[in-house]
Each structure stands twice: as C-alpha cells, then as structure tokens.
Image: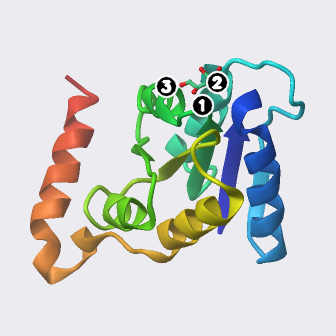
C-alpha cells in the first residue's frame, strides 16, 4: 500500500514522526514535504497529496497542519479526494466506514504523537461499509458526493 504524506511547518514534526512510523511498518511512503520547519503554505502540500490520491498514484493520503482545517478545506477541492479531519480514533473509524475518506487530516498543534499514531492506525485498518451488503446507504451517499464534482 502506498501512502502520500505532507504538512506545513505546523505539522512538520508530526509528519516526520508518522512518515518514519509508516516506513518501519512496511508501507511505501511518498513524503511531498515540507522538508523544513520554516513557514510553508499548507495548500501547496494539500495539492501534492491530493493529486496523488485523486489520480490513483497513492492509496491514501495524510495531511497535517496546525488545526487540520486548512488542509482538509484545500484537499477537498481536488477531484476524487475525500479528506477528513479526525481528532479521535472514533472519528477516523467513522470517516472510513461511512465516508470512505481517502485523505486523513491531522492537527499538529492539538494532538500528540501517540494520539496521532492511534488515529492513523485506526484509519488505515478500517474498511468502507459501502462494500458490505448492509452498507448500501453509505455507498449511495458517497456516490452523491462524487456527483457534486461534475455539477
Ligand atoms: C499556520 O499558522 C496555520 O494557519 C496552519 O497550519 C493551519 O492550521 C491552517 O488551517
């Protein structure tokens, strides 16, 4: 599984930590930057990760800024991206099960490394309910989200 990861300066430390954690667990990781802790504009990294995930060049994306808000707003402008800001493991589970989220946004200034790793692991381990017989409503709703892209 290939994972694209990016951050601005406010998510830099967490991005480095999660990137190394994912690599140590055998994931193929593409780090799009920022590669420095100096000020950087979050939409630039949301675009890079979003393009990779939206085009099928990565299975999932991770984006980290101070709040996770700017990253999620920017990434959701990109076709085929469903970016979800998750502040807990329960959010991560529901973002996958109900929304088929493919980009996880995290808040570098509001989570510690341990919490962010738990949220990330839950996100990657949880399948979309829309593939199950009882999850047709979730599939229909996510398809309606996709149809908004062409209107
Ligand atoms: C940077 O100061 C901050 O605005 C950014 O990391 C993010 O929180 C934006 O949504």
Q: Quadrant of the N terminus?
A: bottom right
Q: What element carries label 2?
A: helix
Q: Which mark is residue 54?
A: none
Residue 132 sits in quarter: bottom left
Q: Which of the two marks, 2 or 1, is nearer to us in this view?
A: 2
Residue 41 sits in quarter: top right
Q: Mark 3 points at which residue?
A: 74
At a point 70% along the width and 38% down the height, the residue shown is 11
Q: Check mark 3 vs ligand 1: CB closer than 8 Å? yes or no.
A: no
Q: Is mark 1 on a helix, strand or loop?
A: helix
Residue 83 x %, y %: 43, 43
Q: Check mark 2 vs ligand 1: CB closer than 8 Å? yes or no.
A: yes
Residue 16 x %, y %: 82, 50
Q: Is residue 124 left or right of residue 1?
A: left
Between residue 11 and residue 58, name the one nearer to us. Answer: 11
The answer to whether residue 45 is visible is: yes
**Contact check, label 3 and label 1, Cβ < 8 Å:** yes
Q: Name the residue under label 1.
A: 46
The extreme right residue here reads: 36
- Of mark 3 and mark 1, the one earlier in the sequence is 1
Between residue 144 and residue 124, name the one nearer to us. Answer: 124
The answer to whether residue 52 is visible is: no
Residue 64 x %, y %: 63, 40
* Cα distance in 3D space between marks 3 and 2: 8 Å
Whether residue 71 is situated above or below residue 87 in the rendered picture: above
Residue 18 x %, y %: 74, 58
* Cα distance in 3D space between marks 3 and 1: 6 Å
**Contact check, label 3 and label 2, Cβ < 8 Å:** yes
- Of mark 3 and mark 2, the one earlier in the sequence is 2
Q: Mark 2 points at which residue?
A: 42
């Amino acid at each position: 599984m290939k994972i694209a990861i990016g951050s601005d300066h406010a998510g830099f430390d967490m991005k480095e930590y999660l990137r190394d954690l994912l690599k140590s667990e055998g994931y193929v990781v593409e780090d799009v930057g920022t590669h420095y802790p100096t000020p950087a504009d979050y939409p630039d990294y949301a675009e890079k990760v979003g393009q990779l995930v939206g085009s099928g060049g990565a299975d999932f994306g991770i984006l980290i800024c101070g709040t996770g808000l700017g990253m999620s707003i920017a990434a959701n402008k990109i076709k085929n991206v469903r970016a979800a800001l998750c502040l807990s493991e329960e959010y991560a589970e529901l973002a996958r099960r109900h929304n088929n989220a493919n980009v996880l946004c995290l808040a570098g200034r509001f989570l510690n490394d341990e919490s962010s790793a738990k949220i990330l692991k839950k996100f990657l381990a949880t399948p979309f309910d829309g593939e199950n017989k009882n999850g047709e409503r979730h599939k229909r709703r996510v398809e309606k989200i996709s149809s908004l892209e062409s209107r």
